[in-house]
């Protein structure tokens, strides 16, 4: 006779499955918020250690951020050549498309994607489709990381800024693909827990990225932040001559949108479905 396994966290039962998942979501959000945001502020001397401990979480946020730029370019009729990741972050190489949408794809992409995962984790009855979409997303990321190997520098002069060491970034999408396949064979409770972790990491990566959003000065490579580029699109100033107050207004707007997306995803995920 088959026996039903009881999931590992409290509050879960056949009659209140959604309630258990919503309680777990609140607990995970508190843990991630403490580890990723509060402790570095309370323990600045240990912030460097915490920075490295949470590095895999940050790189997942970078992955989604750059893929957001690339996919927004494709959706708006532009081109997505490749994206690269290294110890300093990432960069998506695109051209054409709606520049405002391409910039917002990276600035808001993690919060949008994360909020959707949070809602799915508590409200969807079946998770197979969600995991298939995740697999496709991670596989696309791996493809665009590998794509420069098959490109010609004669046709794409920008290829000069890519180097083989960027292929090390492939470890992230490959790991995510293998982990997703493994989780798809696990119980429903584990699948929902993983979706919640991924969703929280993506949302918090946007939430904790306000230092980048509000970076007015030029970046290490001489370029400017996406928020400053976005502000220049909707003002009469060039990106180099953008006044500080104009920049702060647009950066604050982007930060508020990220907070709103996080709040919307959490509220929808915690709302009790009809009939429960």
Image: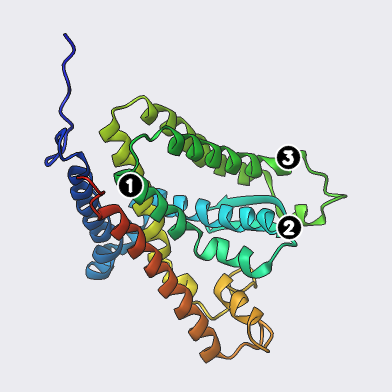
Tell me the SS state at disc 2.
Answer: loop
Please say whether residue 87 is visible from this viewpoint: no
Residue most toward the right? 154
Residue 45 location (% of width, % of height): 27, 67
Tell me the SS state at disc 3.
Answer: helix
**Which residue is label 2 attached to?**
78
The quadrant of the rendering that contains the C terminus is: top left
* Left or right, residue 48 beside residue 209: left
| x 37%, y 69%: residue | 259
**Which residue is label 3 attached to?**
149
Residue nearest the viewer, comparing 198 with 160: 198
**Alpha-carbon distance for marks 1 and 3?**
33 Å
**Which residue is label 1 attached to?**
197
Tell me the SS state at disc 1.
Answer: helix
Classify residue 14 by image quadrant.
top left
**Alpha-carbon distance for marks 1 and 2?**
32 Å
| x 23%, y 60%: residue | 34
Q: Earlier in the sequence, mark 1 or mark 3?
A: 3
Q: Earlier in the sequence, mark 2 or mark 3?
A: 2
Residue nearest the viewer, comparing 14 with 237: 14
Residue 94 location (% of width, % of height): 70, 58
Picture layout, residue 9 above or below residue 34:
above
Residue 67 location (% of width, % of height): 57, 52
């Amino acid at each position: 006779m088959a026996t039903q396994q009881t999931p590992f966290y409290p509050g879960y039962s056949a009659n209140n499955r959604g309630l258990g998942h919503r309680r777990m979501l609140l607990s995970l959000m508190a843990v991630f918020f403490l580890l990723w945001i509060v402790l570095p502020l309370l323990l600045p001397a240990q912030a460097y250690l915490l920075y490295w401990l949470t590095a895999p979480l940050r790189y997942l946020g970078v992955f989604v951020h750059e893929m957001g730029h690339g996919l927004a370019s494709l959706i708006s009729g532009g081109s997505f050549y490749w994206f690269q990741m290294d110890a300093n972050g990432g960069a998506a190489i695109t051209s054409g498309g709606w520049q405002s949408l391409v910039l917002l794809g990276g600035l808001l992409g993690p919060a949008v994607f994360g909020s959707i995962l949070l809602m799915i984790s508590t409200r969807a009855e079946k998770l197979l489709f969600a995991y298939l979409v995740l697999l496709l997303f991670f596989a696309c990321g791996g493809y665009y990381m590998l794509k420069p190997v098959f490109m010609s520098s004669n046709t794409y002069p920008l290829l000069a800024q890519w180097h083989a060491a960027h292929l090390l970034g492939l470890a992230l999408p490959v790991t995510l693909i293998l982990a997703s396949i493994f989780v798809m064979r696990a119980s429903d409770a584990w699948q929902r827990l993983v979706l919640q972790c991924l969703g929280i990491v993506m949302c918090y990566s946007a939430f904790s990225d306000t230092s980048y959003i509000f970076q007015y000065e030029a970046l290490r490579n001489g370029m400017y932040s996406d928020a400053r580029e976005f502000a220049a699109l909707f003002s009469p100033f060039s990106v180099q001559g953008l006044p500080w107050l104009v920049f702060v207004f647009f950066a604050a707007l982007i930060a508020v949108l990220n907070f709103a997306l996080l709040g919307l995803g959490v509220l929808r995920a915690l709302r009790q479905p009809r009939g429960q």
